[in-house]
Amino acid sequence: MSRTAKAKGIVALAVGAAAVVVAGVPALAGAATTDAHRAAPPTVTIDFTGTNSAGGAANAIGAGFGGTATAKDATGATIATVYDQCTKDVISVDSVTAFCTADLVFTSGDQVTFTAVVPIDNPLTAKYPKKFDGVITGGTGAYQGLTGAVHITNTAAAVYELGWDA
């Protein structure tokens, strides 16, 4: 057997072995396999009005603030509690840009976490709706293995609607 034939045989063997390994590990097999192992979260509306400490945070880059809110589904039923923690990254006269991490804890106990760069305008001059995206960082229970984007619409001061592209 020639060296070329031997090399091709070794490459074919390595590719075949890699395919078996990838097929046997759901995290490596692609979206079709992992989609079967998790559910898509429902669209929710969260309202931090009166519960978020952004106004009380120091007006300096690096100042942190956080809050807790309820998440409601389209019928208005409370289906989760949201916990967030943010850090101010850009400060201007009428706005703040913050990097936020949030954890939605559903009444079932399942969780979804995400991060987002959040534009926060002065409530007296803000124009709504404002749309931006975040990154889903994970989930537990029915949402274990969840990845993708969360689409966020800021509909009023401290009120957000979340949709999922997961």
Image (cartoon, grey):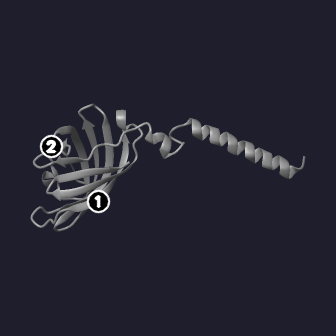
In this rendering, position of residue 45 left or right of residue 142: left
| Residue in the picture at 44% in, 38% down | 36
Mark 2 near mark 1, Cβ–Cβ under 8 Å? no
Task: Find disc 2 in the rendering and name its residue.
Answer: 76
Q: Quadrant of residue 40?
A: top left
State the residue at coordinates (17%, 68%): 93
Q: Upstream in the sequence, badge 2 or badge 1?
A: 2
The quadrant in which residue 105 appears is: top left
Residue farthest along the front direction in this orientation? 75
Image mark count: 2
Q: Position of residue 123 (x, y in %)?
A: 11, 61
86 lies left or right of 36: left
- For badge 1, the amino acid type reads Phe
Circle 1 is placed at which residue position?
132
Does any portion of residue 140 appear in the rendered image?
no
Position in image of residue 53 (x %, y %): 15, 49
Q: Work out how far the residue at label 2 is from the one at label 1, CA to CA, in angstroms.
A: 23 Å
Of residues 38 and 97, which is closer to you in this image? 38
Q: Nearer the viewer, mark 2 or mark 1?
A: 2
Furthest toward the right, the residue is 1
Q: Crowding near pointer 2: few (<14 within 10 Å), some, many (20+)?
A: few
The label number, if any, that marks residue 123 in the structure image: none
Q: Is residue 94 above or below residue 53?
A: below
Question: At numbered mark 2, what does the secondary structure look like: helix, strand or loop?
Answer: loop
| Amino acid at dot 2 | Gly
The residue sitting at 79% across, 45% down in the picture is: 9
User: Foreground residue, 100 or 18?
Assistant: 18
